[in-house]
Image (cartoon, rainbow, N blue to C red):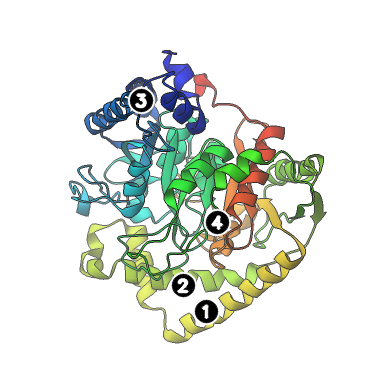
Amino acid sequence: MSDEGDITRLGAVDIAQRIRGRKIGAAEVLDAHLAAIARHNPAVNAVCTLAAEQAMEAARGIDAAIARGEDPGPLAGVPVGIKDVTLTAGIRTSFGSRLYADFVPREDAEVVARLKAAGAIIVGKTNTPEFAAGANTVNAVFGATRNPWDLRLSASGSTGGGAAALACGMIALAEGTDFGGSLRTPAAFCGVVGLRTTAGLVPQHPSALPWHDQSVEGPMARNAADCALMLDSMTGLSVKSPLSCVAPWSSAHAIVAATESLAGVRLAWCPDIAGIGVDPEIERVCRAAADGLAQAGATVEHVSFDLSDGREAFLALRAEAMVGTHWDRLDKLEQINANLAGNIRAGLEVGIRDIAAAERKRAAVWHRWRALFEKFDLLLAPTTPVPPFPVEQNYPDEVNGRKLESYVDWIAPTFLVSLATLPAASVPAGLTAGGLPVGLQIVGPRFAEPRILAAAKMVERMRPIGWPPERRL
């Protein structure tokens, strides 16, 4: 196989199997993806720093290892993009900020080291809003990332570069982070799978706030099986991360690969867990996908599940995290974007009573989730309440004609999951009448990642969306 289009449309599982089986070389796979980057990135702007030379050296090393009869790992030769807030040795890591526009780390973040040890090829860095703070991927260093399904629209954020690069075949896997929905909302807008992981499952080092449990690392891929394969290489106990824990399964990918039905799985469907409303077309597509899982053997029940009273608690705890994360930059706020600087300044005004009240509310929200999962295995809901919006727009200010209370209110359906530190994935559930992807959010209790991804696999099987039309790229 030598055609770029064919190679870049292979999934990570297929790529690794073919490379290990000597049906294709890692260098050939990389060449195809570099060609896709050259073709699509000028318009999409998803890969902000390309590391072609380092990647080719690593790919040739994979090929040499295989020639010696060695197993290079489960991600053998798979091209991966790393979010531009995650440290990569010898590859610029700008955080989307002019403060770090030329910063080149000397060491890899632990998650990057783990991916490399599994045989992954780090192609480069994917674009993010400044310091990953925002749900539209745009910054003053590299500009805006555009949605491959319609270049006029946002890829969302903050892992927007990773989602957009995946959607048009520039990479086969993407690493990302998720605080309020940063893996899930871009996955929804770009038609890929993004997984928010259980706190502690993927070690975070280095981290300014190592005990912070709402921001996590996670995988992103074009399908659930690839996402599970990447997850297996990211997890594992680490002495460098105080929240680090061991997964209660040996291989998420093995579980997902073996799943052929959802017999006995109890699913709850709720269209609006945040109480902010939802676009009627988004609700229709997601409801059809949820109800369709009955064909895979699941029981699906429509429920009322309202977490809207947790929105202010999340905002207070987010404000606390903003100040802690940027503690060393409090005297440089005039050098970062006004939106982020304003958030940090607002965070400085949050008092101890606000934080204490937020933690009490978070506890109440957690117990509501816990009670739900005593009756159901998973909850299904729209990932976002709106379809992709214009890339020039910072954020949507209304949902279905209803004005939102804050600029982050539109991501409440995802951040109310983060508030309880639960795992969740966004999987493509179908397309709007205008041909744009719609994401279905699948939420589970702690360590439910394999079951979440198994359900996502069934959604993909029943409601495939294909690739972005070439005419739009």
- Amino acid type, callout 4: Ile
> How many marks do you count on the picture?
4
Q: Which residue is mark 1?
A: 359
Sequence-first disc among 4 and 1 = 1
- Residue at horizontal 23 percent and vertical 33 percent from the top: 54
Q: Is residue 122 left or right of residue 390?
A: left
Sequence-first disc among 2 and 4 = 2
Which type of secondary structure does the marked residue at label 3 adopt? helix
Q: Residues within 10 Å of mark 3 (few under 14, many from 20)?
A: many
Q: Residue 461 appears in which quarter of the rendering?
A: top right
In the rendered image, the residue lying farthest to the front is 69
Sequence-first disc among 3 and 2 = 3
Q: Nearer the viewer, mark 3 or mark 2?
A: 3
In the rendered image, the residue lying farthest to the bottom is 353
- Amino acid type, callout 2: Leu
User: Label 1 vs label 2: CA separation?
Assistant: 8 Å
In the picture, the disc for residue 317 is 2
Q: Position of residue 265 (x, y in %)?
A: 76, 52
Q: Which residue is mark 4?
A: 411
